[in-house]
Image (cartoon, rainbow, N blue to C red):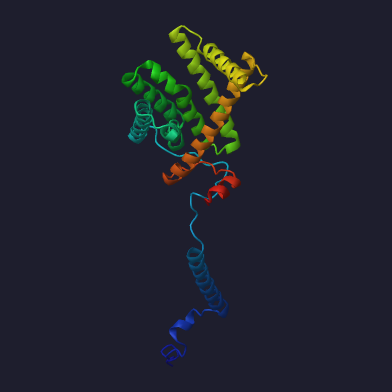
Amino acid sequence: MTDFSRNEPDDKPPFSQNPISSAELDAEGEDARLATEWQEAEAVLYQDEPLASPKEEEPFERLPRQYDPSTPRITVETAFLASVASLIWLINFYFPLGPVLRVFFPIPIALIYLRWSQRAAWMGMLVSGLLLSVLMGPVRSIQYLIPFGLMGVMLGMFWRRRAKWFVSVPIGALLGAIGFFFRIWFVSVLLGDDLWLYATNQVTDFLDWLFTKMGLLLQPTLQQVQGSIIVLVLVNNLIYLFVVHLVAWFLLDRLGNPIPRPPKWVQTLLDYE
């Protein structure tokens, strides 16, 4: 007897051999819905929220810049910025424009520190000194290196470590005052005369004459005059460092190497967001 049951067509469709359960269909639909919602959320996010600008407050600590020490770009940028620093000093010496160029003295060296590293900043400072010694002589070169070369390295260190202005400005002012008195001592050694004592004596005699002409019963002593000059030098350097920070804040932001943000009252006063 022949069995025809094997040749009978199967009533079920082929895809019913591996049926998909309703749970799997629900899961696929849920995944598709979540993917659609995620795409819509991303579209709204990138459309409504602006990209963070370098002017916003940055964290106190920032990861150091990764670079290859053997790349020639470090040498090229260091040499270029060192020559810029020397050129600013040279132009200001022969064509003095008041405080206009003076505020840029430490900025190129500080920019080297910000872009690369401490070693590159020291190299840039030394290259500037060597270039100025060739162009203007070693005396003018030393007067640039102390304090402005050292100030550039110090400001670069503070700005790279995201130090606040109330830390970097007073320390920089102290370094500037030390550099001022160093230059007086250095020139005194070269001339063989004490310029500090000579200048303070002249100021004391002038004030004594002025008070006598005005009918004031005041007679300033040499120590009072010297103390007043020291205070004025410190105040002058505080103002100078504050202006240097303002110039670097505006300039380096546009070069892609922002420094720490100033206090809120400065931003409000200058209307700079």
Q: How many labels sit on residues?
A: 0
In the rendered view, tell whether residue 98 sits above or below residue 31. above
| Quadrant holding the N terminus | bottom left
x, y (%) of residue 132? Answer: 35, 22
Q: Residue furthest left?
A: 135
Q: Which residue is at 42% across, 90% downward?
A: 9
In the rendered view, tell whether residue 237 sits above or below residue 223. below
Seen from the viewer's position, the closer of residues 174 and 38 is 174
Q: Residue furthest right?
A: 217
Q: Residue furthest top?
A: 192
Q: Place residue 130 in its image quadrant.
A: top left
x, y (%) of residue 162? Answer: 55, 39
x, y (%) of residue 109? Answer: 43, 31
Q: Is residue 129 left or right of residue 205?
A: left
Seen from the viewer's position, the closer of residues 11 and 126 is 126
x, y (%) of residue 244? Answer: 49, 36
Q: Which residue is at 57% across, 45% downward?
A: 266
Q: Is residue 40 left or right of residue 216?
A: left
Seen from the viewer's position, the closer of residues 211 and 3 is 211
In the rendered view, tell whether residue 184 sits above or below residue 172. above
Q: Is residue 52 left or right of residue 216?
A: left
